[in-house]
């Protein structure tokens, strides 16, 4: 069975939407980790799938895509776990 080309992008967007939902409910750390996790999932899918199966996850060469997604995902997760439990508000 062949994977539809939109499925990997839909999976990444679903995880990112869940992360944004957590951020909007003021669960900053969980939302940030989910957003970073979505980028890491995108990197894994970009490695595992052929370009015609990866759909919109294909932006540049495979190496640049994987490095970009992975670096941003890891940075996002690391930033999210350093956020304290205080609310982020503008005073």
Image (cartoon, rainbow, N blue to C red):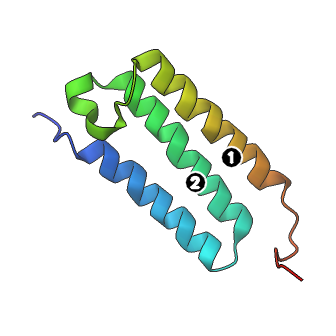
Q: Pick the residue in front: 84 or 55.
A: 55
Which numbered disc, 2 or 1, marks the residue that appears first in the sequence? 2
Does the CB distance between marks 2 and 1 fall below 8 Å?
A: yes
Q: Quick one: label 2, few (<14), some, or many (20+) residues within 10 Å? A: many
**Left-right relation of 20 to 49:** right
Question: Seen in the image, is 5 located left or right of residue 62?
Answer: left
> In this picture, is 3 found above or below 26?
above
Q: Is residue 33 above or below residue 44?
A: below
Disc 2 target residue = 35
Instruction: Say which mark, if any, is on residue 76.
Output: 1
Residue at left offset 58%, top offset 55%: 34
**Residue placed farthest to the bottom in the image?**
91
Splitting the image into 4 quarters, where does residue 78 fall? top right
Q: Quadrant of the C terminus?
A: bottom right
Residue drawn at point x = 69 percent, y = 73 percent? 27
Residue 56, position as x, y percentages in the image: 30, 39
| Lateral position of residue 91 relative to residue 76, left or right | right
**Which label was assigned to residue 62?**
none
- Residue occupying image coordinates x 41% and y 19%: 62
Q: Is residue 52 above or below residue 9?
A: above
Element under label 2? helix
Mark 1 neighbour class, 10 Å CA radius: few under 14, some 14 to 19, many 20 or more? some
Towards the viewer: 68 or 78: 68
Q: Quadrant of the N terminus?
A: top left
* Residue 86: % across, % down: 88, 74
Provide the secondary structure element on which disc 1 rests.
helix
Point out residue 65 in the picture as x, y percentages from the top left corner: 46, 26
């Amino acid at each position: 069975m062949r994977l539809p080309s939109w499925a990997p992008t839909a999976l990444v967007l679903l995880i990112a939407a869940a992360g944004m939902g957590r951020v909007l409910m003021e669960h900053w750390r969980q939302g940030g980790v989910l957003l970073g996790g979505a980028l890491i999932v995108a990197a894994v899918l970009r490695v595992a799938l052929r370009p015609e199966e990866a759909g919109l996850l294909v932006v540049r060469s495979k190496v640049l895509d994987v490095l970009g997604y992975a670096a941003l995902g890891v940075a996002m997760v690391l930033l999210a776990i350093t956020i304290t439990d205080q609310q982020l508000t503008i005073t």
